[in-house]
Amino acid sequence: MTDADSLSEALKAISVSTELIEEELKPHLDTVLAALLEKKKDAAIEITRSGILPTLAQALREKGRLSCQVVLVIAEMARDAAVREPCIEAGLVKELVPYLNSSDQEMLLNTGRAIGRICFDNSYQQDQLVQSGVIPRLVSIMRTYPENDPLVNVCLLALCNLADIESAREALTEQDVADVLIFQLKRSPDAERRHVVLEILGSLGESDTLKLQFAESGVPEALSEMIRNLQGGSDPHDLCSIKIASNLIVSLLLGDESMQKCFGEGSGVVYQDVLSWLQSTNTQLQLSGALAIANFARNDSNCVKMLDLGVVPHILTLLEQHVVEGDVSVQHAGLSALRNLAIPATNKVRMLEDGVMERIKTLLRSDMPPVQFKLLGTLRMMVDGQEEAAMVLGRDATLLARVMEWCEAKDHAGVRGEASRLLAAVIRHSRSPEVVRAVAKADGVRHLISMATSEHVIMQNEALVGLAIASAIDIESMKDPIREAQLFPMLKKMLEDPTGAVEVKFSVLGLICSLSTMKEELDSVNIKESLTKLTDHSSSKLAQQASSILTMLGESS
């Protein structure tokens, strides 16, 4: 009899059997299993078509001595994707789940494989599994048999497939899963196991509750230790592990409480390791290091502490390494870190004294819009409330020339906007005639006027306030560029715009005050008519301000 004939005979015998008598069925199940293990072509499909799946389900229900063999047959069958749906329809998953409570490790292994293969890539079935309570069992199995690698692998792969389901995450918050995953990460025999554990941690780490649990259970420290142990090598699998783990640490730092725990007032192991990443030759670690510092710098006390501990020179050195043909992502992240560190006023002063401004100006050479955008934002943060810093930038002809180029960046609205905002900021915070003259000479006034028509109210206000301050300080430097840009018709239109924001109209009135000496131009657009209309505005403060300016203009005439 050929193998094909013996399989057909075995299937026929199982399908006609009315009672599950072990002595009768075992030899036939052996034949079926042998065909599957020998990878006989289409064996799984033939088994499914034979109609024996309900018999297998019944055998599982009765929990007799055939169970172990039946589970193994199902596990081998389910390697074939074509039979998974029929297995579900025959109710095999429902009958398999109780076997996850077995104390027999071989039974647990085959049950896990069978369920995992049948439910692979089937979100409905996976959700049903979670509802049936498999999550606590998977964690319990790994906790009970942590050294059984095949069994642990099955449980980890199952968790990996289920970890994106919200109900699974909720179930795992009650299981203290972090210690189990850390243990398996530390004893991972290969990169494949490491990557499965890291993928689970990454999926679960999206939950704020689990972020904090992970921080309290030492997950970031374990990841940091793993990175330390893998550094220096060139194995692509190890480098991939380093990338995944460092990205995961950055992600865990997005939670305020978990971030603060990792910082540990600047003495935390994770923070110390992050500092070393900044000095690494591995670009991925440099990037993760800069992003992590930016995350640590989310509150003033951390920023002040990090400046005390000397983090800024490391970031500057890193940025300088990447100025010419460097990594754009690293530059972007490094500037984000500097910008966050510069938010506390005391830090701004110290960073200026330490020459930060001069060193980051080397990045003006960059041709990469993301770097330009972040550099402009960082410089704007540095001058915020800092007269001296604003003076330094506002009088720097080379910097102004580069900013003018960026004010005309056709393909990057973000760079264009940030460049104009920096011009407004240096005028506002320096309040210096010298800076006003330098900006006017560099042809910056027209860019401020253009910014005043932005769709963003905050940018409109910044431009209008900058123009008002500049005009109040040195009207002579401002007159020609204001006339050339036809500012006055624009101001009239903004005052009369029925949908215009009240705060913008206030800023326009402030600018008109500064331009009161340009009486001929104001009269040419009949600005008094617009002001008169505004005296009936629903905002009493705005109406009052318009009335005051009308009076002032009347007196000056």
Image (cartoon, rainbow, N blue to C red):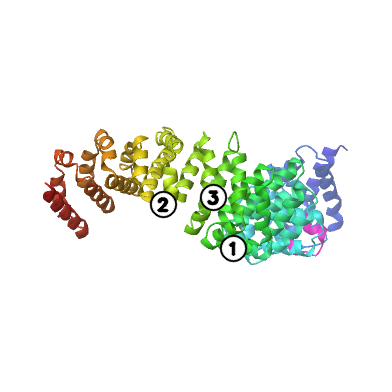
Residue at the image position 62 percent from the left and 59 percent from the top: 168
Q: Is residue 408 magenta?
A: no
Viewer-side residue, 549 vs 479: 479
Give the CA separation, mark 1 to mark 2. Answer: 33 Å
- Determine contact: label 1, label 2, CB under 8 Å: no
Relative to residue 94, is residue 122 depicted above or below?
Answer: above
Task: Determine the main secondary structure of the stretch shown in magenta.
Answer: helix
* Left or right side of 161 for 453: left
Classify 10 Å Cα crowding around label 1: few (below 14), some (14-19), many (20 and above): many
The image quadrant that residue 127 belongs to is bottom right
Is the N terminus in the top left, top right, bottom left or bottom right quadrant? top right
In the picture of the structure, the residue carrying the numbered disc 1 is 260
Classify 10 Å Cα crowding around label 3: few (below 14), some (14-19), many (20 and above): many
Give the CA separation, mark 2 to mark 3. Answer: 19 Å
Q: Earlier in the sequence, mark 3 or mark 1?
A: 1
| Percent coordinates x, y for residue 109 in the rendering | 78, 56
Label 1 sits on a secondary structure element that is helix
Amino acid found under the numbered disc labelled 1: Gln
In the picture of the structure, the residue carrying the numbered disc 2 is 387
Amino acid found under the numbered disc labelled 2: Glu
Magenta span: 99-109
Asked if one can make out residue 85 in the rendered structure from this viewpoint, the answer is no
Label 2 sits on a secondary structure element that is helix
In the picture of the structure, the residue carrying the numbered disc 3 is 338
Give the CA separation, mark 3 to mark 1. Answer: 19 Å
Q: Which of the two marks, 2 or 3, is nearer to us in this view?
A: 2
- Determine contact: label 2, label 3, CB under 8 Å: no
The image quadrant that residue 330 belongs to is top right
Which numbered circle lies on residue 108? none
Classify 10 Å Cα crowding around label 2: few (below 14), some (14-19), many (20 and above): some
Viewer-side residue, 398 vs 293: 398
